[in-house]
Image: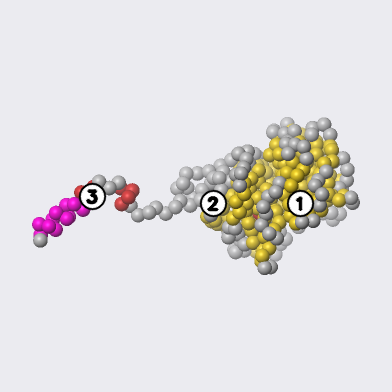
Amino acid sequence: MNGLRAVIVCLVITCAAGTPPAALASPATPPSPTVGGPPTARPSWSALAVPTAAPPVAVADLAARGPREAWATGSEHAADGPRPTLYRWDGTTWGRDTTFPGADDVGRLGKVQFVDDEVWILHERAGAGEILRRSAGAWSAVPLPQTLRVHQDFTAVPGATWVVGEDDTGPKVLRHDGSGWTEQPTPDGVLYLMGITARTADDAWAWADTTTGTTVLRWDGTAWRDANVPLPPNSNVHTILLEPSGRVTLGGSQYTDGVVTTYLMTFDGHTWRTTHPPLGDTYTEGMVRGPDGALWLPVRSDRAFQSKYARVEGRRTTYSYGPERTNAIVVRPRALAKAGPGLLAFGTVEIYGSQPNLMSERLGG
């Protein structure tokens, strides 16, 4: 019997020696989500100082071109109405820019985008609209051809610019091709245009409220047509991300039995895929594709003194918190932007006993 036992022990030792070490080790814990770092890196959000504005403040948009240039837009309070606010990140600090036309006039700044080497911003000024353009360090303005009651959104790419809104006659789509503005007709049944984005001068997408519900429209270089996106029943659209690869990501809300839930849709060029990550009723307008390839978006925090962000990659959703802020009762990041190997956030923070003011945070980089 002892001889048989010795033979068995020898066999076990021999098998173990021929087995790769990885097969003997315990399954590794999946690495935590990273931004711009190796799989073992665990970057954290850090607070960035922002010059204060006159509260109450509003944050509209944030755009970045690498880690050393970003712009954030919005408005602050003044006795005779809102004043536009514009902040620039230089890779080290946030500073306020007051050199653009109309900086001291009543109005507000909206979406900001980079077009080639220029910065373009939608500016609502004393009820009229214009596009601010920053080139070679100097600002200029391109006025809209008519006054719109609502300047809902704009988008710009090399060779084309669109502004959507409405006047007393209904929804309007205005397009600038580099030489002048033209008004573009929309399909029948469009009641209100909620947003617009573009990948090229011949590929733009808009989402609209129509007589049949929310509809996604697409400009194909000739006309605006129904894109036939199979949206979930009783849903709306918050944002559409267009990527150079051809991928399209759409975020919105769905209403089911009185409950609002967030959904995401991804188009790979052939098929739309719908998911319902555990995001509650998160508004997805601030969603971006991060440098790690995942989707990132600010969500409502369960901690009064910290912001909260969701990272969605396939079927997996994880969360991270911003830095702790002393005496804060609400921390609300409004917009995110990919800034090189990291992420930038811009929003508001309310410290106990004071009105909300501006805040910014950075992850990685």
Q: Position of residue 260 (x, y in %)?
A: 67, 63
The amino acid marked with disc number 1 is: Ala
Q: Residues within 10 Å of mark 2 (few under 14, many from 20)?
A: few
State the predominant SS element of the stretch in magenta: helix
- Residue 244 position by quadrant: top right
Q: How is the image coloured?
A: secondary structure
Magenta-drawn segment? 2-12
Residue sitting farthest toward the bottom: 257
**In this figure, which residue is indicated by the disc labeled 3?**
15
Which circle marks residue 208 in the picture? 1
Q: State the residue at coordinates (38%, 54%).
A: 27
Task: Judge whether residue 7 is colored magenta.
Answer: yes
Q: Position of residue 89 (x, y in %)?
A: 66, 43
Mark 1 and mark 3 lie on one chain; the one further toward the N terminus is 3
Q: Is residue 323 left or right of residue 330?
A: left
The amino acid marked with disc number 2 is: Gly
**In this figure, which residue is indicated by the disc labeled 2?**
314
Q: Residues within 10 Å of mark 3 (few under 14, many from 20)?
A: few
Q: State the residue at coordinates (75%, 33%).
A: 159
Mark 2 and mark 1 lie on one chain; the one further toward the N terminus is 1
